[in-house]
Amino acid sequence: MSLGQSGVADGCYPCRAFWRKPLFLLCLGLVACSSWHWEKRGAQEGEYARDETFCKQLVYTGTDGFVTNASVRRMHDCMQAKGWQKVTN
């Protein structure tokens, strides 16, 4: 098997083409399944940004930028305590 100009074996293109569509569909499915947003009945303009900033400062201060499952849960708890609910798209 010879190498093409890109340095990839010439016979490998069909393999890449074969996986392109299934991988795209998998990624699309994962995005669709995990899509949600925050909603709060009667929220005023800018309220989400203020509450999100408050919760981020409360939860992530002193974490050196590390995000863990526990910190994400604390962030969600803080937003819910402020009246926000997770809603699927």
Image (cartoon, helix red, strand yellow):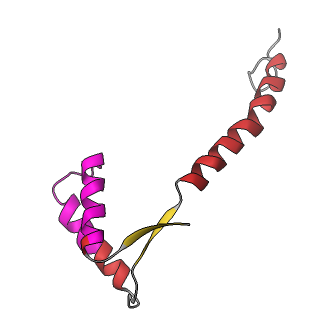
Q: Which residues are magenta?
A: 53-80
Closest to the observer, 10 or 57: 57
Residue 7 position, x and y percent, is 74, 21
Left or right, 52 with reference to 9: left
Residue 27 position, x and y percent, is 63, 45
Any part of residue 56 in sight: yes
Residue at the spot x=19%, y=52% of the render? 63
Q: Determine if the magenta segment contains residue 63.
A: yes
Task: Say if 4 sits above or below 51 in the image.
Answer: above
Task: Say if 7 sits above or below 81 in the image.
Answer: above
Residue at the spot x=80%, y=29% of the render? 18
Residue 64 position, x and y percent, is 21, 51
Residue at the spot x=24%, y=67% of the render? 78
Task: Say if 48 sits above or below 75 in the image.
Answer: below
Left or right, 2 with reference to 45: right
Q: Determine if the magenta segment contains residue 23.
A: no
Left or right, 24 with reference to 5: left
